[in-house]
Image: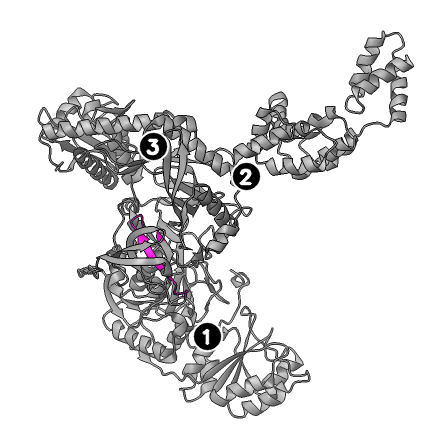
Amino acid sequence: MKPGDRVKLTTSEGTFEGTLLPRPALLSSDITVLKLKTGYNIGIESKKIEKRTVLQEYQTPVPVRAKIVHDPALPTVAILSTGGTIASRVDYRTGGVYADYSAEDFVMMCPELSKIANIKAVKVMSMMSEDAVAADWQKMAEAILESLKTADGVVITHGTDTMHFTSSVLSFLLENLTKPVIITGAQRSIDRGSSDAFMNLMCSIKAAASWDGACVTICMHGTISDDYCTLLRGTKVRKMHTSRRDAFRAINDEPLARVYANGRIEITNQEYPKRHEGKTSLRELDNRVGIITTYPDIEPAIFEEHAKRAKGLIIVATGLGNLPLHNKKTVKQALQKISKKIPLFICSQTLYGRVNPSVYANLRELSIEIGATYLSDMLPETAYAKLMVALTCKNTKEFMKTNIAGEFTTRELDDAFLR
Amino acid sequence: MGETGEIDIAAAQQAMKGKHYLYECNDENACLIDLDEEPPRNMREEALTVAIQVGKLFNAQFVDEVQVMRKTVVDGSNTTGFQRTSLVAMNGTIESKHGPITIPTVILEEDSGRIIKDENERTMFRLDRLGIPLLEISTGPDIHSPDECAEVAEKIGRILRSCNVKRGLGTIRQDVNVSIEGGTRVEIKGAQDLALLPKLVELEALRQENLLEIKKELEKRGVKSIMTQIQDLSSTLSRSQSNVISGALNNKGAVLGIRVQNCKGLIGKEVQPKRRLGTELSDRAKTAASVKGLFHSDELPNYGITDGEIAAITKKLECAPQDAFILVADTKEKSELALRAAIQRLNDAIKGVPKEVRRANEDGTTTFLRMMPGAARLYPETDVLPIRLTKKRIDAIALPELLDHKITRYEKLGLGKDLAELAANSEHASLFETFVKKFNKLKTAYIAEILLTTEKNIRRQFNIAITPNAEDFETLLTALSEEKISKESVLDILKEKKPVKEILGKYALLSDRELELEVKKIVDANKGMPINGRIGKAMQQLRGKASGQKIVELIKKNS
């Protein structure tokens, strides 16, 4: 008797007929779950079951695959799938949601896609985004480079939790990008009618096919209604809500464009690199980077521990870029020692606004005496991503200070705050 | 798709519509969870307790673990696209005059949003009801007459009202399932009035009989399936005076039509009073394509379509004398969808009675709502953990006092039969019991009257709708019990529609000394008047400030 079988269970209280379901490993194992003919699942105490009869054995269904027809009049877009909620199904073994959709499945699930572009689908990996490691980003970048040879743009489907890490890393890994790379995902799994996956995917494909930009962006819902998606610069974006559809926001930047479900693209910020002829190449990655978020009573040992492994540290400081250098702890001494060996970079926990190396005495001590580099209005996650690439460059500090992929803005406009 | 990967017919049918859904919500009763912007919390303990009480009252058998499911609902009434639902108990019974009626399931689910506006392409829902716990109790196929149906519905209603459930119109809704021999189970939703149930059952039985007759007639005529081609009649009808047709054509739409072989006279056959097979085709077309309706040859000439045009259509569609035809005028895309839905319904007619969910109309007839959903639309709610129902837990839940029992108890407390029934059925019942204990100086019946009848009295007498809360009642009864206000003031106080404690001062009784002074003033000012005139004057001026009896005594004493 195995999950999926149609069975008859006899207990002291009666007889139950239905489909045997798997029991999630994390739940207590003394319950047998049965799907009744009405569709309802019920839990029966296993010890009550006196007799079990298999009525019909489970047969694995044969999936139907969509046939994709090439239309020479349409642009070509490559969908690289990496996993995440947008590619999730209910897992009957765990009762949770797991990632399994391959890119072909997207085309079948959303046939309108084939009216926007010729879709080429590549399953790069299948992971939940929180599990990403540096090698995964390298793999994604290689897949993009390969796809760009024939496609007019690339869409990556991705889990949302660390999507902004990926958008940053790819922004720095892909040197001289000539076409758009659009990362998208879903905050609601595709099994439900209210999923944002369909619109996010449609808008992303549209942007990859016809937007005139050539940079890495995130394309997700702009509001909680199905009004439009926003195209957000890969180095200036962050997931700012645990569950809302419009969780992704541009920070210290204006969204680049709105993409409507009917295919209209409305440019909202002109500052982005345009498509061009040229050759894209890959930079390299070194994952020996640490991020430390400081707090008032932080132990110096935390910096020291990190420095043992890291070749560079991002310190997420308070306010304009402050650290507790003058309380009874010896943070200052620890940092002085560390900075002789590895470079230190300062971002702010406020996320909005830029750090400043000279407004207060503390900041001057940190920048002049200790030699930490202040990263202006760069987001901590972007700094982390950039440092991984910078460590493989000849002059790490110089690379960090150069605007590579729009990670610095020179002027902050009043209406870019909390939007 | 359900866990098994099958597409549910009801879900697929809805998914075709391409409608827009708007949601109306306010901060008082909708949060991010209602908007499907935050995962759900666990099932509400109190709701599960009520479900268990109801299960116990039906002698039902409980599941050992409650599994929360998602039921796919794509009509927009749930922001998620599904309704959370769970089977709590099975195989209960309830006694009726005609013997035991089985209760196969007691299901706890969340209520959906309610429809506020339904236009062709957009539907608006209000979210104030969404997520409120809802019990679904089904009865087995043991009810054999419309009267029995009403009796059982009332009985279940009384059991529910014994538990802590909401009262008022729409809080207890009956979905009636009807099937006759040779027919099919059809579910009718939205009957709010118990009195309508017998008629609904009767008219649905009639509908099924008539549909079976149509089936027989189709068999006789040798119609095995409706195979037909959709044709564009726009040029044939380009000069039509029919508003619907000219409207569609002026809007760059089209008139599409089909020939329906051997069906003349059948589409116009009445299946329920004033509802024909044609009405059923039209219902399906409206739901499938958001069109306003369709025309069929059995109802023409009419609606501005002339004999001449009928001849032209007949010719274009190559209809034989025994054939019927159907027209839809709208955008080409929608007209085509609408006709496909009508063809589908015609093919269902060949088989007899289709499995449908229908909505009750006020006159007892019904309108098509959606296809009957199947088991494939249920799959597990992965965001909520299952809930174990141990014997210990179930045993620990006390049964509520049954309504009949409560009525008898209230009668013993001093209420007349009607008032006792009103009190027991009222949502103020527990407040009533608290007040009876607290205000032992006041008569039980008087407390009940204030709680249960003043609202109605004020609405009738002054046409003012009041909604006093528990605190208002308590302040009022305290003042009455301490003789700080007179009974005569009660209506005046409540009809001000303000918090009672704020305005109570205005209605305070005068002390004996103050009253005597006031009475003397009135007597002095009306010296020439006979004593009854003075009493009238005093009563008018001192209304609510002292008891009438006291005023009369004082006037007599001072005259």
Residues at marks 1 and 2, CA–CA distance in whole angstroms? 64 Å
Name the residue at 29% across, 49% down. A37
Which chain letter goes with mark 1?
A
**Residue at 10%, 28% in the rendered image:** B220
For mark 2, give the secondary structure. Answer: loop
- Indicate the position of residue B383 as horizontal and vertical percent values: 42, 59
Q: Give the Cα separation between the discs numbered 3 and 2.
A: 27 Å
Chain to which the residue tagged by mark 2 belongs: B
Q: Residue A269 location, x and y as percent?
A: 43, 62
Residue A393 visible (yes or no): yes
B517 sits left or right of A45 in the view:
right
* Residue located beneath label 3 in the image: B143
Q: Secondary structure at mark 3?
A: loop
For the residue marked with disc 3, what is the amino acid? Answer: Ile
**Subunit ID for the residue under disc 3:** B
Q: Amino acid at mark 1?
A: Thr
User: Residue A37 in magenta?
Assistant: yes
Q: Which residues are magenta?
A: A27-41
Look at the numbered discs 3 and 1 and tell me whether their residues touch, using CB distance below 8 Å: no
Answer with left or right where residue B301 lies relative to residue B20.
Answer: left
Tag of residue B62: none
The disc at residue A382 is 1
> Of label 3 and label 2, which has the lower sequence position?
3
The tag on residue B401 is 2
